[in-house]
Image (spheres, rainbow, N blue to C red):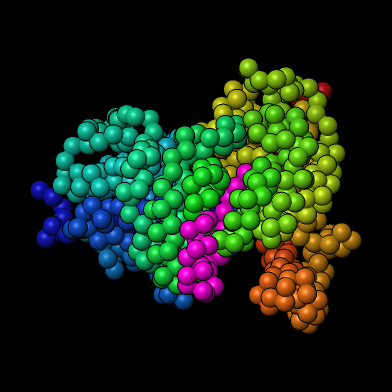
Amino acid sequence: MSRLANNLGVFRSIDAQFGKFNVFKYEASKTISLGPVMVATVAGRDLPWLECEVISENNYRRRYWGPRDEFGYPDHYALQREKKADIIGISAAMTNAAPRALQIMQKYLRMPPELRPTGIIIGGWHACDYPDEFLNAAEENGTKVVVVHGEAETVISRLIESICRERTLEDIPGISYKENGIIIRNGPDFLIVPGQEIDYLPDPNFWLVRYAKIKIFPVQRTRGCSGKCRFCRVKTLPRAMSPERFLKQIKDLVSKGVKVIFIVDDRFEEDREGCIYLMKGLIEYKKQRKTRFPKLIIQTRLSAGKDDELLALMRQAGVVFTAIGYESPIREELLAMKKPVNPAKMVEWSRGFCQNGISKHMMMILGYPRMRVSNDPIIGYPDIEQPPIRKTAKKFWQFIRQVNPDTLQVLLYTPLPGTEDRFVLEGEGRIYEDVDWGFYDGTYLAFRPDKGIDPLELQHEFVNLMRKFYGFPIIWKSRLLTLCAHWLISIIPLTLSMPFHWIIRMPFMGFSPAKAWQYPRKIFRNAWKRFLGHLIIMVWMRNYKQSGFEDLLIRKSAEAKALCK
């Protein structure tokens, strides 16, 4: 007999919270992961008898009366008492959030029988790579635990119905589950939504999200990436929604009063012709409505900076901010990454975004291992001593000053599960096995660097680069003084001088008030972001000291020095 009563059920899709010491919590509190929303949306469309809801632990507001437990996390016991979910979906996409995802699974499994769900479905990149972590930790108490490998929209409805109706799972592809103590895995290794079916997926229903305030709405046109970067987990070939269908999706969000839209494609310009069609459609829509259009945030490759036509259309369509993976200014590291970027052209291409009024968020990786890989040029060997990390950090800083981005994100290289790099580093025994998944957010060193690089020094240089950018050249080492200087500059002088900036810019902008305001607004926005960035770094440094991670690095540093002798 099915455990469902009256043929009705509830599906709760949960986006697990990042680790305690994660640096991205502030940005995550303004948006939501698209995966849990899409899975709930598809399940709600296909199964009329199923009520769906989404809980984002990173965007969970007290002001909306979201129940919390004694540790400040969402109280899932209270949520289950309020509305019992028959099926729980947990996203373990981010490795950093995997410990929390495992904790949520165990929390639901240990609930009393009257609250315990019929099944728990776990998905996301990390769960794909380490399904046994979840399946072996699951208690066999009548609740079915299943891990989905890949894009769950393809099987979520069949899977929920099979669990609720207590049917066999052997015919459902791309999943792992436990049967009589044995882990069973159904092929294929990775599920994808075929390109011809992407247009038939429903628009994400953000109104399924409870206890959250979404300020930045994520949407996606292209899945996969044509790049072959060794540090990246995304390896599927690109598949795109038609530009006509995607334009309709954006118009629908605009009609609901959305003010900021984040297009989460790894490369917005992947399909150039479709991208141009989309931009022209948005420009025409703006002209018809004669009103302020929402801000668009995108991710794109640096080489798009040489495409003047595309950049001009982006700006006219409302693209105000783009995240660009520069990764490194050092040729040897770019070759090791398989990053298709010409170091000699990086600064020149960066100017294209600035000239078109598009703000740049610069993303870089410090401490990338210059390993030798078969069929690749000889870039360097792990046992050959590399330059001191201070020299590398100095080159990074000089390059950052040349590009002059609006915001900066320097991360330590992190060997993420499922990447080519991790496979090589594991073979060389260079992964720090005693570093918990909760530290895998790009701000904590998780592997033994190349010979000649001190682990503790590498950790400190990463922090110093961020502090220099978000601080001031002279006083950046003084945290409180820098914070006060930022606040005074952004609040008092800039606010008072903005009308003068506007008057000065008017003649150069054809006496257009809207265009003349762009420059002073950008000055104020960047000053305010520097203030917030410095504040976030201060909080991270406090958490870093509390975590005890530096003690671990001191031990690793001593081990590295012993190996060099």
User: In the rendered view, would you say 456 is above or below 36?
Assistant: above
- Would you identify the image quadrant in which residue 405 lies? bottom right
- Would you identify the image quadrant in which residue 302 lies? top right
Q: Residue furthest front?
A: 510
Q: Quadrant of the C terminus?
A: top right
Q: Residue at x 11, y 60 (%)?
A: 6
User: In the rendered view, would you say 122 is above or below 484?
Assistant: above
Q: Residue at x 75, y 37 (%)?
A: 343
Where is residue 520 drawn, in percent x and y? 74, 72
Q: Is residue 24 visible?
A: no
Q: Residue furthest top?
A: 375
Residue 281 drawn in magenta: yes
Q: Which of 514 and 103 lies nearest the eye of the viewer?
A: 514
Q: Which of 273 and 232 lies nearest the eye of the viewer?
A: 273
Q: Residue at x 72, y 32 (%)?
A: 333
Q: Is residue 506 left or right of residue 98?
A: right
Q: Which residues are magenta?
A: 279-302
Residue 397 drawn in magenta: no
Where is residue 338 drawn, in percent x and y? 64, 30
Where is residue 71 drawn, in percent x and y? 49, 63
Where is residue 398 drawn, in percent x and y? 84, 47
Q: Is residue 373 visible?
A: yes
Q: Residue at x 42, y 37 (%)?
A: 128
